[in-house]
Amino acid sequence: MSSTGPRAATTDRTAAAAPTTGRRPGRSGGPRKATRNRAGRFREAAKRQLIPWLFLAPALIIFALFKFVPLVRMIEMSFYQVRPFLGDVYVGGANYDQVSSDEVFQDAIWHTVYLAVGTTAGSIVLGLVLALLLEGQVKHLWFVRSAVFLPVVAAMAVVAEVWRILYYPNADGAVNSILGLVGFGPSAFLNSADTSLNSVMVVGIWKGAPYDMMIFLAGLAGVDRALYEAASVDGASVWRRLWHVTFPALRPVFAILLTLAAIRGLRVFTEVFLLTNGGPNGSSEVLMTLIYKLGLERSGELGVASAGSVVLLAATATLTVIVQVLRRRGAHR
Amino acid sequence: MLNHRVATAFVTLLAVAVTSAGCGADDAKPKAKQDNKSELEIWTRRTPGSEQELTTKRLAEAFTKKTGIPTKVIAIFEGFETKLQQRASQKDLPDIVINDTAQLGTLVDQGLVQEVKKDDIEGGDDISDRAWNAAKAIDGKYYAVPTSAQAFALFVRKDWREKVGMEQPKSWDDLVTLGKAFTEKDPDGNGKKDTAGFIIPASTERGYASWYWSTYLYQAGGDYFKEQDGKFSSAINSDESVTAATWFQDLFCEDKVVMPGAVTANTNTSHQLWEAGKAGIYLTGPYVMGRFDKSLGKDKFEIIAPPPGPKGEGSLAEGENVYLMAGSKNEGGQEKFAEFAASVEGQEIGMDADRAGPIVRLPVNTKVEMSNTRKDPRWEVFQKVYDDAGVYSPTVKQWTPFRQMSADALNALAADCSADPKQTMDELSKKFDAELDKQGVRA
Amino acid sequence: MSGVDTALGLDAKRGPVAVIAKTVLYGALIFVFAGPLVAIMIGAFIPVSDPTKLTVIPDEFTLDNFRQAIERDVFLYLFNSFVVVGVGLLFQVLVSILAAYALARKKFVGSTLVMLAFLGTMMLPEEVLAIPLSLVLADVPVVHVNLIGSLTGMIVPVIAWGFSILVMTEFMKDIPVELEEAARIDGAGELRIFWSVVLPLCRPALGVIGIFGFAMIWDQYMLPLLVAVDNEQFTLPLALRTLRTDEEVGVGVLLAGSLLALLPSVIAFLAFQRSFLRGLTSGAVKG
């Protein structure tokens, strides 16, 4: 991994600099005090191995109790017909069959991927643009940033209501009026199979871009101003400055956002549920709405919902691993 | 080494925690120790803080005063089914659940309710047969005591109808004509073409599309199933059913008299559109009268019985039951509460006169004189529709999957004008048969 | 020296053209992102909202929606939300920074696995985990307590959140080893290094996990639903979802409740924004 630490000490740390140590920055193996004998060194090594676990202990305990135990139970439920009161009935792979043979299943997968990729890419790009535009310490920027951040803090139920109004399919609906000003015809938005998925995506980007913007702003806040000064003294154009100083410094942010995208992208649910419920005619059905329909709206099909969730989990895990591998590969170049 | 042993212990602990958490198929349902003064926990599917919750509490208090059995009312709305499942997993159900009749099949299937012997219910003969039928499962036994009923009627903008100079609709054709008039003739007089004929919640959410369409299905003489000795076969693609489906699609595609945005609208959005004057014909229930009186004004709309379709009158009928949950510590108390809720006194408390919190919409007790407590004559319209033409949803084992599948099909017809109704219904019929097979009740 | 405080150098542009351009730009951004929400919030003051357009100037003004919201115990729910978020966020940040410190700055056996495990928890849909989770809450393994029916039951599970661990880890990774080694040579112990050296450099990241942690805990739906035994324990978002499908009241009550729910989030956001500014200056102190 190239060491482009933004808060560099004294040495020149442009994107081209090679790491001075053979290790990743910030990863210490521990103190290298002189130890007198094998037993002492062993104790040191044991302590070194133990300390991280001590720091991790609180998180591990809570995760184990409230995430992993239920997860194991969920995987177990996927092989049963779950009847909470009467007791479960073992059904083997029947739940998985039901989920994957549902004719909407394949479409749902495709919709999920499409929505995930589109929303993520849109949010990241727009989020970066917003962060660059709204960076700075000036007082009025606080206000603008807070205003732009409203979609993130507003309850999803309200966001759905707003967009339902904005998307009203008549020619005098809010968005349609604006489209009319620039010469485009009215669209049915959420109510037509052709446009429903894209309409949901726009809402996702609208809510997601300010979210990503915040993380980008955090990254931008950490860029060493001395580098900007140096670049400006060198007469570098804004674009060169962005490319050679800013973007490398945003490495952690891109890492976070891409990882998050892989993890949460496939789980998209609430926007679709509240705006279209997968309709019209299944055109915006995603995996989670399908799982909800098959498993949770029909009480007692928890086993089916679990099976669908395990499928979702496997897909997400695969995707995350791929993203992490690509990241490592990309960083080593 | 030490680490290995710790790890093994941890995994064992996990395994024990997991297995003890719920797969007890060997637990027979032991009868709980009975205590006929133990408090009854009553769950009702209402919004906490609403008028209806208050009415339920009043009912419970009156019961406690009369019998001395303490009660506790808990109102839950969102996630009701989830919370019930949660309690079921803990093998600790509430004593009473007041919920829709459509939930009967599922509750029985999951073993959550106790059987009710109709003859043991005091005053059971006073309850109408039709209401009792909605408490009967496919095995012919009763699993609840009815407490409320309702049917649907047509809300029409009176001011609009008078402006376009038309009579109250008396047939399906009249409805379409009226709808067209509302769409084209600018009945609100604002010079803009922003009104439509019908308000239709055609979303697939909670099966609304199918729920709405059922009334027309029955008016066309169609049905979801044909029953024969407790077994069912699909009737959703019969000629009559297809007629109803075609008519439904035509509203969207041929006549174009439906409000925009219908295919993703749920009932709340539909209510709002009606209140904002976006359309003028709305088939809905009596529970919104209070709200519309306040938001729109009583003088602006009228309530009429839905005009008959090709085969005659029809309306979806629904209701609520008092379910006696399994494993209760006070089975005597459960029965007494159910009897009270269905008695004339209980029904009258539940009807809440003309106020905003009725938990009994139409009484199931035939001895109740509605005009004793209610002065609003519009209630009579609903009563008449229920008595003459009400048809409940079928009592298969699990109604929800069928409701969901048919809502998907109808939503498809409404959204895609090129879809063929006969073909869509045929495909739906195949799915119905498959699901009937799965539930083990196929003829 | 101007023009070097931001990546694009927008703060350097001062001339009249620039001012106008910036005003138009900011205005457009506010219109697009905040405009719809502000407009719909006006609906909280209107008795009957038109669902086809956003009314900016209401014909009729009423506080009745708020009255109905209050009748439905909205202040109690607000209070519960505050308690859950306040306590929960505090512990969440604490646990996350401890875990991130280990993952970012220490090489040890199993670190990758632990990270993947934390990430894995974010892949799970909460709707399905609901029932198993509620079973655990009713009888927590090892300690055998019942957390159902108390706000503690809503607080404890949110303390562990993969997102904050992920963000903190990534930001902590970027701190140069030299600083840590210098402190160690000075004789600082592990905790001191953590608290006084590494943590202060992560202020922007702390701001991020503070804001997002707040939003995440505030928005929790499934967990409060499972833990609450009756509506005394409801949190506000739970109540809002209920209002959405409640047919007795119009959308105005939902909006009134949402407005009340929005205010704390906005205030929290403004508070956390400060940390970004501190982050900017800390960058200049280095070197």
Image: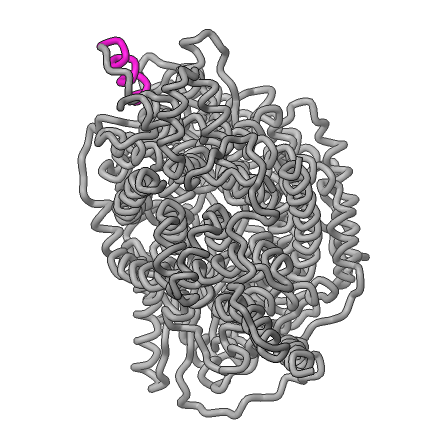
Q: Is residue B311 visible?
A: no
- In this rendering, the answer to whether B46 lies above or below C286 is below
Residue at 70%, 69% (x, y): give it.
B139
- In this rendering, the answer to whether B347 lies above or below A40 is above
Q: Quadrant of residue C51?
A: top left
In front of the other: C220 or C69: C220
The magenta stretch is C16-27
- Name the image colouring: one colour
Q: Quadrant of residue A217?
A: top left
Q: Give the x, y percent position of residue A270.
A: 51, 44
Looking at the rendering, in which quadrant would you find the C terminus of chain B?
bottom right
In front of the other: A297 or C259: C259
Looking at the rendering, in which quadrant would you find the N terminus of chain B?
bottom right
Does the magenta segment cover residue B303? no
Residue at 54%, 21% (x, y): give it.
B256
* Residue furthest top as drawn: A183
Does the magenta segment cover residue C20? yes
Q: Is residue B338 visible?
A: yes
So how many labels did they put on this image?
A: 0
Drawn side of residue A132 relative to residue B438, left or right: left
Q: Give the x, y percent position of residue A106.
A: 74, 39
Drawn side of residue A74 relative to residue C92, left or right: right
Q: Give the x, y percent position of residue B106.
A: 62, 63
In front of the other: A28 or C39: A28
- In this rendering, the answer to whether B441 lies above or below A263 is below
Residue at 52%, 22% (x, y): give it.
A188
Judged by its main secondary structure, the magenta piece is: helix
Residue at 56%, 72% (x, y): give it.
A35
Q: Give the x, y percent position of residue B155.
A: 41, 37
